[in-house]
Image (spheres, rainbow, N blue to C red):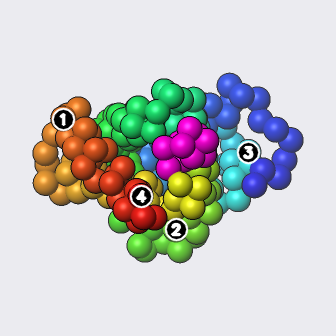
Amino acid sequence: MEAGPKLDPERESAILGATLELLAETGYEALRLDAVASRAKASKATLYRHWPGKADLVVAAIKCFKQEDLAQGVDTGSLRGDLMATLRGVRELMSGPTGQIMSGLLVAVQKDQELAEAVRTSMLEDKQGVTQRMLDRAVARGELPADTDVSIFPEVAPAMLFMRIFVYGDSVDDAYLDHLTDDILIPLMARRFGG
């Protein structure tokens, strides 16, 4: 996506941080690149040279904020442990400031085709890769069949957490994560493929 020479990491961090701050303050629709440039003490030309549009900048900012990715380094030695650790990460993400940003983006992607495309091609593909690595480890340990559908976790878990946090306003404690893991996710993965 980047067209110009690579940005200095400190400069890039300032721009992406300013993007997140303004996104939280104004929402996606009201976010303006000149405001991001002003807050980050950068030129609009610098922004456009590295991010062709607002959608690309927002996606880059969100990905950078949680670069430690939810399951990237998680390997607890069991599928259940990996699921619980990942769910705790999703819970923290959705319960914090980024969760508010993400809920706002869900509305924005319905109205903005450019943003919807950037989110689908970048962020969702990343999540599929994280899930695939977690399932590959479970298959290698003999906990799941090789043909387990990689889409079960990203389709079911975030949707349930989103509904509980943002729609019902309920807390997501470890007991709920135990229920989601033991009573829904693992049985669904096993049942779907005859386990």
**What residue is disc 3 on?**
46
**Which range is magenta?**
134-144
Q: CA distance from mark 4 to mark 1?
A: 25 Å
Which one is in front, 4 or 141? 141
- What secondary structure is marked by label 1? helix
**Image position of 29 with respect to 141: above or below:** below
Residue 126 in view in this figure: no
Q: Position of residue 22 (x, y in %)?
A: 44, 43
**What residue is disc 1 on?**
175
Q: Which residue type carries mark 1?
A: Ala
Q: Which residue type carries mark 4?
A: Gly
Does the magenta run of residues contain 136?
yes
Which one is in front, 157 or 60? 157
- What secondary structure is marked by label 4? loop
Mark toward the viewer: 1 or 3: 1
Left or right: residue 97 versus residue 144 is left
Which one is in front, 107 or 188? 188
Q: CA distance from mark 1 to mark 3?
A: 47 Å
**Number of on-image labels:** 4
Confirm or deny contact between disc 1 and disc 3 (CB under 8 A).
no
